[in-house]
Image (cartoon, rainbow, N blue to C red):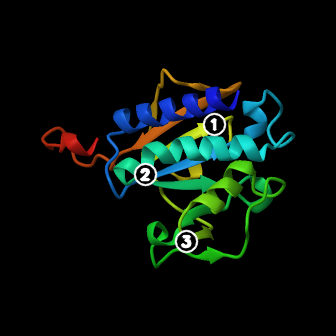
Amino acid sequence: MLNEIKESARNAALELCEKAFLKAGQTVIVGCSTSEILGHHIGTESSADIGKAVFDALSSVFDKIGVFIVAQCCEHLNRTLVIGREAAGPLSVVVNAIPTPAAGGAFAAAAYAGIYDPVCIERFSADAGLDIGGTLIGMHLKRVAVPLRLENNIIGKAHVIAARTRPPYIGGSRTIYDESLG
């Protein structure tokens, strides 16, 4: 079962990279309910093994292209974010918490263990996102989020919703837009 979960997570990450046009230095917010992956109600059956399997699978894709993972904790830590200090930047407000499977979630705990120089912060605006199991990541995406339909939209028994972001369009009918920005 873990191998299937890893493969599904890896495929979802690969597809997100392609459809969101991700580049080195960009960020992906990931919310992940290991309970939902197991087919249970969110927050009821946290699994450290599944959290680590999903984190490892996503990291194997994102690390290769230099995209930073931002892991969203559960509501018990007020949706705090786990991120590497370098990616957080000097203006981020660091909070004092270490996620565990019981408070923060198994995926966030795995991220805290797997990210180099991890910190927890309150807010962030990521370039793209993966919501695995209905964790509500939208508050941590940049202002204009564009939903993406993934073919790889199931991990275990959890539905996966993806998004990319783009700069806001301004101007009128005579405005020329840079299509490479989304």
Identify the residue shown where x is 81% and y is 58%. Answer: 103
Crowd around label 1: few <14 · some 14–19 · many ≥20 (10 Å): many
What amino acid is found at the position of numbered circle 1 in the picture? Ile
Which of the 4 image quadrants contains residue 57?
Answer: top right
Q: Which of pointers 2 and 3 lies earlier in the amino acid sequence?
A: 2
**19 lies left or right of 46:** left
Residue 137 visible to an observer of this rendering: no
Mark carried by residue 117: 3
Q: Residue furthest right?
A: 44
The image position of residue 163, as x and y in percent, is: 47, 38
The image position of residue 146, as x and y in percent, is: 43, 37
Mark carried by residue 63: 2
Q: Residue furthest bottom?
A: 90
What amino acid is found at the position of numbered circle 2 in the picture? Asp
Q: Secondary structure at mark 3?
A: loop
Identify the residue shown where x is 48% and y is 45%. Answer: 60
Mark carried by residue 132: 1
Question: Mark 2 or 1, which is nearer the eye?
Answer: 2
**120 lies left or right of 48:** left
Q: Is residue 149 above or below residue 147?
A: above
Which of the 4 image quadrants contains residue 176?
Answer: top left
The image position of residue 160, as x and y in percent, is: 59, 31
Residue 99 visible to an observer of this rendering: yes
Q: Secondary structure at mark 1?
A: strand
Identify the residue shown where x is 32% and y is 40%. Answer: 21
